[in-house]
Image: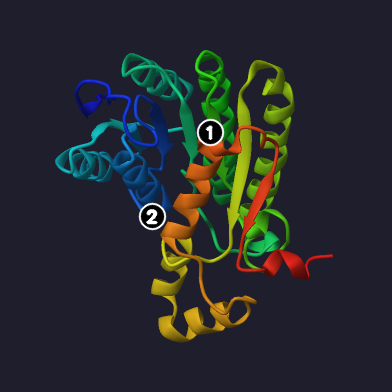
Amino acid sequence: MTPLGGGPAPVATGRFGGRVAVVTGGGSGLGEAIAALLGALSAHVVVVDIDADTAAHVATAITDGGGHATAVTADVTQEPDVVEIVRIAEAAGGLHGLVLSAAVEVRANLDATTDEDWQRVIDVNLKGPFLCMKHAIPAIRRTGGSIVALGSTLGAIGNPGYAAYCASKGALVNLCKQAAIEEAPHGVRVNVVSPSACDTGLFQRVVAASEDPDALERFVAGNVPMGRLGTAADVSEAVLYLLGDESSYVSGTVLALDGGLAARRV
């Protein structure tokens, strides 16, 4: 695993100037959008992805725009890789923020989910965040930083065809609450942003594979009280709020970013 890019730590200007943030799954989808916004706001972004090309592409876009970024190819389910991610972040100027965006999805009902698919989803969506928090938290204690995990509406409700995904995201919420309670005395905040279907990310893969993508998007948006899908900007701004000083008294929360869907839950 070799880091690419880098350069000097960002100067303390801009909203996140002087801070280093790791974004897992930062090579595409919502992770890419979050990494780009952090870079635009002067953070040094450690863009982590299992795909070397996408991680390098996002890091290069940030540095070409005058920001600071390091691309790291890593598998968040492998503990040695996670240890190296944290080492690279600390070497860049300390670890101030961790965004857990790496995730996979398998579409299958419970009785049709293979053991292999179940394990893959649980490993990436739950074990990955566990390992990242386990090794990042000691570093974040030293900076008084923040952790934000990307959950899902399906972490609070069931949905046919997403047995493993729902289980992984539901467990992620409780894992983050546990971390928030344990780390509150040490000044480390841990929160979850739980989007519903968005115009970027895993849902768009479902859309692309459907027989009528436009019809599927209209149907899903029509079930949202606000009548639209979430956007990458919606998610990115929510994540940055929870990473930043503006949310200094917020920890252990789940921010339902779903256009009002949460209001329908019992």
Disc 1 is placed on an element classified as helix
What residue occupies the far right of the structure in this picture? 266
Question: Residue at image x 52%, y 44%?
Answer: 241
Q: Is residue 145 above or below residue 124?
A: above
Question: Left or right: where does residue 89 sit relative to residue 158?
Answer: left
Q: Is residue 183 above or below residue 174?
A: above
Residue 98 in the image: state x and y as whole percent: 48, 32
The kind of residue tagged 2 is: Gly
Q: Nearer the viewer, mark 1 or mark 2?
A: 1
Q: Quadrant of the N terminus?
A: top left
Question: Residue at image x 75%, y 67%?
Answer: 263
The kind of residue tagged 1 is: Asp
Q: Quadrant of the C terminus?
A: bottom right
- Residue indicated by mark 1: 245
Residue 48 in the image: state x and y as whole percent: 36, 35
Question: Residue at image x 52%, y 28%?
Answer: 132
- Residue indicated by mark 2: 29
- Determine crowd level at label 2: few under 14, some 14-19, many 20+ residues with C-alpha closer than 10 A: some
- Determine crowd level at label 1: few under 14, some 14-19, many 20+ residues with C-alpha closer than 10 A: some
Residue nearer the viewer, 256 or 133: 256
Residue nearer the viewer, 145 or 1: 145
First in residue order: circle 1 vs circle 2: 2
Disc 2 is placed on an element classified as helix
The residues bearing labels 1 and 2 have C-alpha atoms spaced at a distance of 25 Å
